[in-house]
Image: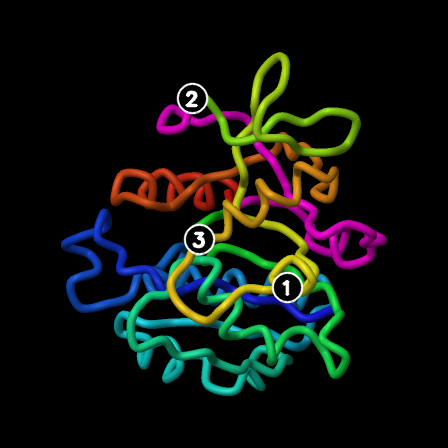
Amino acid sequence: MKAMILAAGLGTRMRPLTDHMPKPMLKVAGMPLIEHQVRRLVAAGITDVVINHAYLGEQIEAYLQDGSAFNCRIQYSSESQPLETGGGILKALPLLAGPRNDEPFLLVNGDVWLDLDYSALVHRPMNDLAHLVMVGNPEFNPQGDFYLDDGYLHKEGQGSAFTFSGVSVLSPKLFAGCSPGIFKLAPLLIEAMKSNKVSGQIYDGFWLDVGTPARLQELIEHVGCEAR
């Protein structure tokens, strides 16, 4: 299985830290966030990684290069302007989907952190259009995103919704009929949910959307505590 790291955001909520550096290059424990992600993917057995980028993306390429220093092969999908999640994935799909355009791939947001072993997703049978890792709702998303019912996710439901962690396994078939351009991933997922084609699982370990300087500091403290 191949993997894609989403790294094309502008990092506006991280300013001034991102005035001259893309958010994935911000350091935690002396290592850029995106390097942590690459190393976790390689530890899970993934050796082909695709990274999309836009804002100051040349810094990411200069640092990671072809991936050989991390025992993997890294390819890049450069965007002249951010294409949103869906558009960015569609542009990179020829690098991900295999010769028959049907191979599922692991998708990881470049600005999330969770202590999940990705190998559990790599070896999971994939019979749906998407499989999402869900987490409990943080303060900035108290209503959650999707409801989980008997292993499948829905936009509407009973009880409490959960928050999408930013980690998923996607089938290229999810993007059938899509046209190149700027569009979000969420509408595609919601449409597929109507046909029970999006499964999900709950992850109850440490998770953080590293979207602000305060959350970056929280992550630095968390990783520092783990190291002690």
The image shows residue 74 at horizontal and vertical percentages of 55, 81
Tag 1 and tag 2, C-beta contact below 8 Å: no
Provide the secondary structure element on which disc 2 rests. loop
Say whether disc 1 or disc 2 marks the residue closer to the N-terminus. 2
Q: Alpha-carbon neighbours of circle 1 within 10 Å: few (<14), some, or many (≥20)?
A: few
Q: Amino acid at mark 1?
A: Ala
Tell me which corner region of the image, top left, top right, bottom left or bottom right, holds residue 197. Answer: top right
Under mark 2, the amino acid is Pro
Determine if the magenta segment contains residue 137: yes
**Membership of 38 in magenta stretch:** no
- Residue beneath label 1, please? 176
Point out the stretch of residues depicted in magenta. 114-141
Instruction: Please name the residue that numbered disc 3 is placed on.
Output: 184
Q: Main secondary structure of the magenta part?
A: loop
Q: Quadrant of the N terminus?
A: bottom right
**Residue holding disc 2:** 142
> Residue drawn at (62%, 67%), measured in percent from left and top?
3
* Residue at the image position 52 percent from the left and 87 percent from the top: 66
Residue 182 figure quarter:
bottom left
Q: Is residue 162 above or below residue 16?
A: above
Q: CA distance from mark 1 to mark 2?
A: 32 Å
Mark 3 surroundings: few (<14), some (14-19) or many (≥20) residues within 10 A: some
Identify the residue at image location x=37%, y=84%.
62
Q: Nearer the viewer, mark 1 or mark 2?
A: 1
**Residue, x 79% and y 26% (percent of image)?**
150
The image quarter in which residue 32 lies: bottom left
Going by the numbered disc 3, the residue's amino acid type is: Lys
